[in-house]
Amino acid sequence: MPGKQLSVVVTRRLPEAVEARMSELFDVRLRNDDTWLSRSELLARVRGVDILVPTLTDTIDAEVLDAAGPSLKLIANYGAGVDHIDVEGARSRGIMVTNTPDVMTEDTADMALALILSVVRRIPEGMAQMQKGDWNGWSPTAMMGGRIGGRKLGILGMGRIGQALARRASALGMSIYYHNRRRLRTETEQALGATYWESLDQMVANMDVISINCPHTPGTFHLMNARRLKLMKPSAVIVNTSRGEVIDENALTRMLRAGEIAGAGLDVFEHGTEVNPRLRELQNVVLLPHMGSATVEGRIEMGERVILNAYTFADGHRPPDMVLPEMI
């Protein structure tokens, strides 16, 4: 069976079905507990391995690649984003990098829409009121949110997830606009009912809702900076299910506190688990612990793609989900 001799190191606990299948196919070292590896643990764990299966919580840089040595030939990332991996450095050492595209598309789009609904309709505020026992009955002016239908949604990043969100939001009566590195084909725009804005500034200034769906790259770091956030209408909201680094979190926090932006729904944060404490205090903000892809189906499918890439590589063929530096 191809790959039986190859050693595989996994840096985090994966769904049981995924770990069981990996154990059947490879000489795999799994984790017993679901914690982040320390830097020293990661460096020790990668030495002499053939295939490394990291997640977004692992920084795979030159030091890690050097520690792994010449035996490492494949980094099969468990996840779509690869901004935590030195892809160029890996390639220069003859190491292939793969990811798990597509499988998280629908789940993440669901979460983006859930955040839009939660913020605009003030759902968490209502839940908090009920859980505290503070509800005194219906009132004509209590907990008034906004109507979703008719709102303008500006999607920043119209890839697979952005398009999946567009289809969902359109079904709820939202008008769809987008800014992207490359304009979509005319037939795709027509199918989505989406209008392209070449100027991100102009799109931001005219939208009721902004959804961040682009990857984190050097070019997208703080793409929504203080200047651009100030272009948003005071009644607008922003949601992010992509990467926290795309938004200047401190600037966003200041503007939310000042009422210059109506609300935000965030599933990702600029500094990982170190969420701005002032952000936690705001009632007009919905914060989630990076749950965008957290479905049983999605996480198992991610594992299946990792296995497919590793197994194909072990069989002497090019893995189907190769990541190249020019793709980032």
Image (spheres, rainbow, N blue to C red):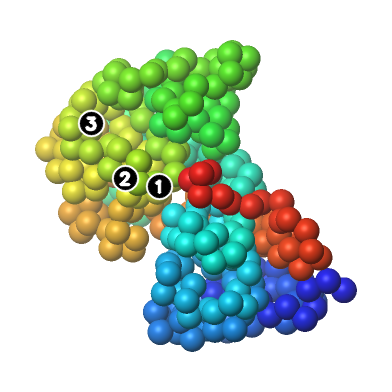
The type of residue carrying mark 1 is His
Residue 235, x across and y down, in percent? 24, 25
The type of residue carrying mark 3 is Arg
For the residues marked 3 and 2, what is the alpha-carbon distance in whole angstroms? 13 Å
Image side of residue 100 versus residue 111, left or right? right
What residue is disc 2 on?
Answer: 221
The type of residue carrying mark 2 is Phe
Residue situated in front as seen by the camera: 41 or 90: 90
Q: Secondary structure at mark 3?
A: helix
Q: Secondary structure at mark 1?
A: loop
The mark found on residue 216 in the picture is 1
Residue 323, x across and y down, in percent? 58, 51
Q: Is residue 164 above or below residue 26?
A: above
* Quarter occupied by residue 261: top left
Residue furthest toward the left?
258
What residue is disc 3 on?
Answer: 228
Residue 278, x across and y down, in percent? 18, 54
Pair 3/2: label in front? 2
**Mark 1 or 2 closer to N-term?**
1
